[in-house]
Amino acid sequence: MTDTYPSQLLERAVSEIAKLPGIGRKTALRLSLHLLRQDSAAVRALADSLTGLRDGVKRCHVCHNLSDTDTCGICADPRRDASTVCVVETVSGVLSIENTGQYRGLYHVLGGVISPMDGIGPADLEIQSLVERVEAGGVREVIFALSPTMEGDTTGFYISRRLAGADVLLTTLARGISVGDDLEYTDEATLGRALAARVKMG
Amino acid sequence: MTDTYPSQLLERAVSEIAKLPGIGRKTALRLSLHLLRQDSAAVRALADSLTGLRDGVKRCHVCHNLSDTDTCGICADPRRDASTVCVVETVSGVLSIENTGQYRGLYHVLGGVISPMDGIGPADLEIQSLVERVEAGGVREVIFALSPTMEGDTTGFYISRRLAGADVLLTTLARGISVGDDLEYTDEATLGRALAARVKMG
């Protein structure tokens, strides 16, 4: 890009915004010009929310979910079932499962999956803390809600080996055809697993 | 949306980001989680660039283009042709024309177009300052580079009437088929104008 901006401040804002994933310089310019039309207070509120998020947000010391406090709202909620722990890769996983409205247990956020290609080993993830959590007792079921990929499967397998000695039920999310999906467009691997895992009707 | 975020800070950042045009809550969440993975300094640089832009940027007192100084870099450049003024609606217009690399004159940013439906009249735009600029002398040509819409045409017509007494050439951007456009997909209005304004070959 050889754009010549009339203002260094504009140039700087466009460059900073364009660093965000999925946002190019054209969109960054459009957003910058939009911000110029807003109240100074509104722009400050946006800027403060970004630094406030980055500097203020913590990790729950139990499940490693994002939290404003040392223990997150889910772990601190006495109405949640503390005997069930759902293992997810990231915070997005917690949000997705919470949005189903069907889960009342707790979580454990690994922070990723084992991926030798990316140099991520078990020690880089919150696996040891999960093992300790289970060994401390009180957990009856660990649900693996990891990506249905090679890395996700490897991570689930590794953790299941680490938990082999514990008296705990290990489960994983059902794999099968998506609700509303057209059979014609379902990939063979998914269809094959859905067939093998077929359930009795009615 | 009934999303329940694990953190008020995250909720606030998502809400603020989702106020930006073209960005929904899903994208805002993705951007927020991205920012959480960045250095604190990087997030602060982004936030500072936004408030710096909003509070620091000025309008050039001559052409009303964005500028870091009282007179913008284009108006202050002695190599530019001060006898030609290109009238554009917004800063985007300046950037678009500058990017062609083919214009060496100055600009005048109106700040919009006359649009009675939106309650925008001539007094809401930098029209009086344009008239005064032309009346002050030294301008030989005013080029209208406004949107090819009813509002753009009306604005151009209104300004041309206001400048009727001045000894200045008024021109407008050529309307015609776009370079690389397929004739089959060119709308009738454009094609009709392109036909009427046909030029001798060679």
Image (cartoon, coloured by chain):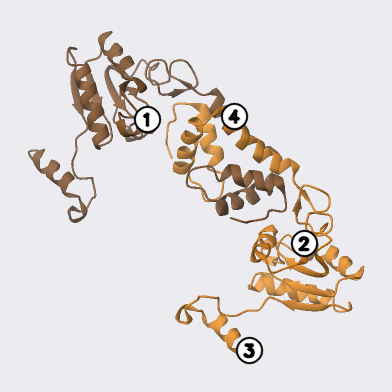
Chain colours: A orange, B brown
Cα–Cα span, label 1 and label 3 = 62 Å
Q: CA distance from mark 4 to mark 1?
A: 23 Å
* In the image, residue A13 above or below residue A95: above
Q: Residues within 10 Å of mark 2 (few under 14, many from 20)?
A: some
Inter-mark Cα distance, 1 to 2: 50 Å
Q: Is residue B131 left or right of residue A52?
A: left
Give the labeled residue for mark 1.
Answer: B90
Image marks 1 and 2: residues in contact by CB distance under 8 Å: no
Q: Which residue is mark 4?
A: A41
What amino acid is labelled 2 in the image?
Leu
Q: Amino acid at mark 1?
A: Thr
Q: Which three-letter amino acid code belongs to the residue tagged 3?
A: Val
Describe the element under mark 3 as helix, strand or loop: loop
Same chain, labels 1 and 3: no
Q: Earlier in the sequence, mark 2 or mark 3?
A: 2
- Tell me if residue B198 comes above or below residue A66 in the rendering: above
- CB within 8 Å, label 2 to label 4: no
Measure how far apart labels 3 and 4 are at the Cα level: 57 Å
Residue B158 vs residue A107: left or right?
Answer: left
Depth check, mark 4 against mark 1: the one in front is: 4
Q: Position of residue A83 (x, y in %)?
A: 84, 70
Give the CA separation, mark 2 to mark 3.
Answer: 35 Å
Most extreme residue toward the top, as rendered?
B136
Q: Nearer the viewer, mark 2 or mark 3?
A: 3
Parent chain of label 1 = B
N-term mark: 3 or 4 = 4
Residue linked to disc 3: A199
Residue under numbered circle 2: A125
Residue B202 seen in the figure:
no
